Amino acid sequence: MPKIIIPPIALHPGQQRILESEARFRVISAGRRFGKTMLAVEWLALAEGGAIEGAPVAFFSPTYKLLLDVWSDMERTLKPVIRKASKTEMRIELITGGKIDFWTLEDPNAGRGRKYKRIVLDESAHARYLQEAWERAISPTLTDYRGEAWFISTPNGLNYFHTLFRRGESEPGWQSFQMPTVTNPFIPHDEIESARQQLPELVFRQEYLAEFVTFGAGLVKPEQIQESVTPKGMATYMGVDLAISTKSGADYTAIAVVSKCPDTGTVYVLDMVRFRSSFNDMIKSIKSMADKWKPAMINIEQVQYQAAVVQELIRSTDLPVRGVRPDKDKVTRFLPLLTRYEQGKVIHDSSLPLYFTDELLSFPQGEHDDCVDALVYAFRASSSTEFLMA
């Protein structure tokens, strides 16, 4: 077969930087008009190792409507080398043997059973089933070829796309990129500046600066989070928010540990963990945390099936366990702590995990609030007159 040449797409430096990365998994937080679709077409279809060289690849999008736009771009770009293009099957087959499948992430089983060398998950932050689809269906499609994946999106709060972005900042094999609109030199700067003047600040930061922000939430502001060393000798208290499930996407069990200064009322957040586990492993985790901190009181949420955890701990241990029932809505329960955050009377230990900070800053509209609930129960344990006993 004669060598096939399709003129390369002209990429700007920001796009080129992503393309040249050697990370297997790339997470791209991109502002509007950055040029992410063009970049996806180049990498999946035209770049070395892509469909043009016979590789099976796939493009995932949150909705069918968004998928059709990319389909049209791909079909137009690859027309000289297309053997078959079927909108019914949502597949383009090239004369080189390469195949490009198109999937909508409205189906959490998208891609299940296929094998791909490269995939792009477009507008990932706007996919309702992103975590479930990635972990259960899409990630396994890369196994045979040790394939690569790109997650590209404008941010949409602190959801699972944000979790992946965090992973790209620290885990081997992953890399994250923040690409504001201004990275694209073909977008007039005065247009971007006009958007800055016309849009609310948070909207502009998300849509044009590709920053992760939260809307209508943010009860606790970033500047209200203080870190310091906890004074010695104060009693410790634990709070546990239960979720007995190991399923991906389910709520977490969260355990918080705090101390409270009896003189000033300042609350010190000492430790925080969250996890998904079975009943027996959950019991072990609570015991382990209690052994570490020797709490004077452990408040555990007790609603329906969760009562079994409280009963088992009381039966099998001498831990100071109390079951508490949530008496009000989540925000109302959090207000006493919010007041202390605003007064500078909540201090965080520097070792607390980032996911706790993310939950706190996005509460009450974040993807998860288990750590916040656990913190409320721990705070109640430190203030015995605020208990609501089961």
Image: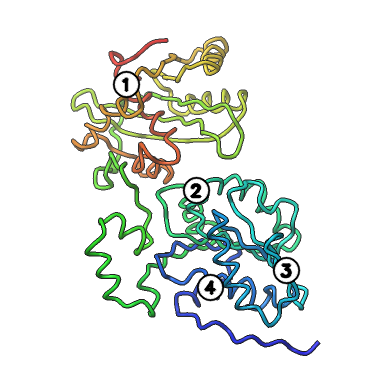
What is the x, y in percent for residue 171? 54, 56
Q: Name the residue under label 3.
A: 99
Is residue 336 placed above or below 159 in the rendered structure? above
Q: Mark 1 points at which residue?
A: 382
- Mark 2 vs 1, N-terminal side: 2
Q: Distance between the residues labelled 4 and 2?
A: 22 Å
Q: Mark 2 points at which residue?
A: 160
Q: How far apart are marks 4 and 1 (CA)?
A: 53 Å
Q: Mark 4 points at which residue?
A: 39
Q: With 266 as the anchor, is 286 left or right in this view?
A: right
Q: Is mark 4 on a helix, strand or loop?
A: helix
Q: What element carries label 2?
A: helix
- Mark 4 vs 2, N-terminal side: 4
Q: At label 4, which amino acid type do we have? A: Leu
Q: Distance between the residues labelled 1 and 3?
A: 61 Å
Q: At label 1, which amino acid type do we have? A: Ser
Q: Tell me the quadrant of the picture where the C terminus can be found.
A: top left
What is the x, y in percent for residue 71? 60, 67
* For discs 1 and 3, the disc positioned in front in the rendered view: 3
* For discs 4 and 1, the disc positioned in front in the rendered view: 4
Is residue 125 placed above or below 284 in the rendered structure? below
Instruction: Check contact, mark 3 vs mark 2: CB within 8 A.
Output: no
